[in-house]
Image: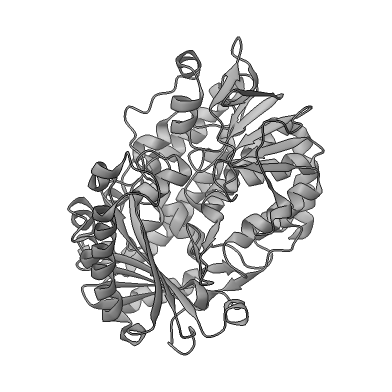
Amino acid sequence: MVNKLYQPYKPNLDFSGLDHIVIGSGMGGLTVATWLAKAGKKVAIFERHYVPGGFTHSFKRKDGFQWDVGVHYVGNMAEGSSLRGFFDFLTDGNLQWETMGEVYDVANIDGTEYLFKAGKENFRKQFLAYFPKEEMAIDSYLSLIEKTNKRGGAFFFEKIFEPWFSKSVGWIFRKRYARFSQKTTWEVLNELTKNERLIAVLCAQCGNYGLSPKNSSFAAHAMVIGHFLEGGYYPIGGADQICEKTLEVFTAHGGKIFINADVTKIVTENHKVKGIELGEKFIPCQSVISNVGVNNTFNHLLSETDRNVCNFNLKNVQPASAHICLYLGLNKSSEALNLPKHNLWYYKHDGIDAIFDKATLENAPENFAYISFPSAKDPNWETQNPGTATIQAISVGNMDWFEDYKDSNWMKRGEEYLQLKKNFETEMLKVLYKFFPQIEGTIVASEVSTPLSTENFTNYKSGEIYGLAHSPERFALPFLRPKTKIKGLFLAGQDITLVGVAGAMLSGLLCATAILKFGSWKIFREIKSRQ
């Protein structure tokens, strides 16, 4: 990323006259900041990491290899789609997308392959070919996905209602959605079919929202499945192009972004925002938008009094799951190695809940792996990095597995920790060689990240990547709204809406609308004109 788009935080810089401060530069923060800047507001983003972008950023190593940390594919990106229109608005149309083709995901369960094909009817036909006796269940499932997501649209839009309107009308939207959100994915699917293999295949992409079927809300499942139903897309040039192209527009409209800027406190007085603190430095503003997760916001940046004012309580909702990832660099091209664009979801057997529940550091890759090929998805990779390729292989992780190293520093955790990562790499390579034996002997770079790596850069204490767990209880939390009960304090990010780039972007859209109110319609018209 070009450094002219951002600068390191220094206490002696001029921070006067800010309308809005955004804490965190993930997709939700980028969206609301750019939206407000385009509306003529003076906005600054403060990011604790040494690069902006949150889970949209990529990291590079001296050998030239680059890997994504969170964005592996995005749905609903066809020309003319609403989500494409929002991205075009944020980037002035300068972010380009590449389709992953007819097949965007492949599930391999106990040695049997199942293809996920782009397009609702293609999906339906393919699943009928696999499960010819389950036509009624498959049709009911697709119908239920559509119905749930229609109710979901109203549920999320209700989050910007003013309190009086929410009490008088909003409860209707919440109640109608609760029929789906308050049931687990397994409960809903078990009502449609008793075919355990069909249920497992329909849930094979559950890693996209981080919970197994018996723990996840069907509402989260439906949103994610519906998001990808028309296929997967990848940003040309890599995932970090999402952040870079958005920041180009943000800074062109006067926005500022500061890295290495670890906000330590949101300052309030009489339940009203006054500004933020970074160490000893106080920076005033009219409003603060926190994009660092509700747990970090309320438990680490606000006082107990402020938490009580907002009725903040996470007693019944846990953090989302963590993960461990193996990053590989290869000395042959994706084409030479015949690497696919589609992702592979591997499960040793169809008991997905048991696989997740019984996972250990030693057996995780053996039982579950998500494998992605960023260099194969990106048409620019070969031009910029000829004769090379990249792979990412992920399995479930748990912060408890690394408890002995929680007090150590990044890149300085000791030989025992490095050996644990090496053991994971060895086990994950066994899975990779099983499915892609042609890569053996071509690996020239490898790296492993753990929940401790995630915690270091995001401050998510459990190393979670999806914020709050997408369980039924999550959808009943009353404070997951852009506007808080503290005047001038707003929330953005995947906790407010849903997991992923699209979910975080939606949160930014809702937050900007809550701030600008009727002034946001001018921007909606601009977005509409791009579709």
The type of colouring in the image is: one colour
Q: Position of residue 467 (x, y in %)?
A: 43, 42
89 or 178, which is in the foreground? Answer: 89
Q: Quadrant of the N terminus?
A: bottom right
Q: Position of residue 71 (x, y in %)?
A: 51, 60
**Residue at the extreme bottom:** 336
Residue 286 at least partly seen: yes
Query: Considering only vertical position in the picture, is 387 above or below 274?
Result: below
262 or 352, which is in the foreground? Answer: 262
Q: Quadrant of the C terminus?
A: bottom right
Q: Kindly identify the residue that appears in the image at 79 percent across and 56 percent down.
A: 529
Residue 85 at least partly seen: no
Query: Considering only vertical position in the picture, is 92 above or below 267?
Result: below
In the image: residue 475, left or right of residue 515: left
Q: Kindly identify the residue that appears in the image at 58 percent across and 77 percent down.
A: 381
In the image: residue 218, left or right of residue 95: left
Query: Considering only vertical position in the picture, is 349 above or below 402?
Result: below
Quadrant hosting residue 345: bottom left
Q: Position of residue 99 (x, y in %)?
A: 57, 74
Count numbered badges in the picture: 0
Q: Position of residue 522 (x, y in %)?
A: 81, 43
219 or 12, which is in the foreground? Answer: 12
